[in-house]
Image: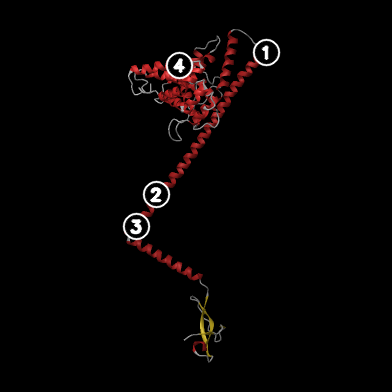
Amino acid sequence: MEASSGEDDAVSVEMKSGLQLILCALCDSDMHRKELFGSEGVEMVIHFLKKRGEGFYSGLGHNKLLLSIVDCVWSCIVGCYTTEDFFLAKEGVCLLLDLLCSSPKSVHDLILAILLELCENPNTVSHLRSWRAGEGPTAPTAPGLLLQMWREEEAELGVQRDQDGCLTDAKKPLVHPQQTDGQSLEPPGASILELGENLRAKIYLIFCAVGFQDLPGLSAEDNVTLSIVKRYLDFKVGEVWEEVCAELVHDDIRPITPDRESLERICKISEESAKGVMEEQRSLLQRREAEELQQEQLLYTEIKSHWKQQELVKKSWSHYVSRTSNYEVLKEVKAQRELSKTKAEIEADDIHPIKRFIGQVISVEQTGAQGPEGVQVSLARVSIPSAGQDQVQTSPNPDLEYFRPVSVKH
């Protein structure tokens, strides 16, 4: 089959579909044959899964080929841990999720059923948590994809939700018009029959295997939907008890007082659970609004800083142009620079000490030795006022501070 994978004629596609259906019939409910299917069979399945339903609407039978390969996974791989491990090692779960993204809605029920069965294998959960629909941190994750399918399913069924996807009816959080229109009072009731008619039950069970906490890549809208999925079983149990009460009323059966009180208490608990979910959803939306407001403020601050910087650059350029093109402005700038320079010099002079000292020769003595060593010079230090003082000391006998004699060379 792999050798002729490039052929797209109707005959080859029909042959491949027929061979896969034969394998399904042979391996179904036979664990030994599933083991014989082995790694080579898994390689064949992986080869066709990588095509992701190409040519589904071509009219050449690719739709049958896709259904047969999905059936092959169900019949030949699921249930045998050895074959499942081969399938998981070849990224089979990721390929099923890719197929779930690209295939038509009619196949979603089968793919979700396979994923649900594979969740019995403990190695499957890590693949479901790590898968992304594309490259980058913003690509949809498997939990995000399942929650999106949940919203689409409820929109198609006509379940009452507000514009944010929140609950609007605490008494009937999951009921849709089709369920109430075709409601049957004969067992099983409409709440039980609808479990197999839509995808919500399978999505809930997959989340039970994956978990409801620390799921990657979820938006605020996804968390709002997740709060409903998390309580799906409680809401469904409440629906069943509501139908029990309706059947008793329809059959004119009056329960005894303890039973009636128990029924009322059960229905009240279900309604309170729905109100708790509604409160949680309001909290999630308020948190999202606060985060959006904070992001807007950060963006506004960044824009304001950017415009302020542009204004400073523009003002600096305008000032430079005026200095180079207007002679009067240029003279004014030059005068300001000279004034600043003068002030700087005055400030520098203020740092110097008030009095300065210089040396003065007061005597020269001959010692009789030959050469320069025979001359001794005595120096004195005289106080001289610094610039800016009005009076100069004129005392005839200034105080002199003598230094020791030193030898001076000629």
Whole-Å distance between the Cαs marked 4 and 1?
Answer: 55 Å
- In the rendered structure, which amino acid carries the disc numbered 1? Thr
Disc 3 target residue: 322
Q: Which residue is mark 2?
A: 310
Amino acid type of the residue tagged 3 in the rendering:
Ser
* Eye-nearest disc, 1 or 3: 1
Distance Cα–Cα, label 1 vs label 3: 96 Å
The mark that comes first in sequence, 4 or 3, is: 4
- Element on which disc 1 rests: helix
x, y percent for residue 278: 55, 26
Instruction: Report the front residue among 191 and 344.
Output: 191
Front-most of 238 and 370? Answer: 370
Dot 3 falls on a residue whose secondary structure is helix
- Confirm or deny contact between disc 2 and disc 4 (CB under 8 A): no
- Camera-side residue of 248 and 335: 248
Q: Dot 1 corresponds to which residue?
A: 257
Q: Give x and y (percent) for residue 392.
A: 51, 81
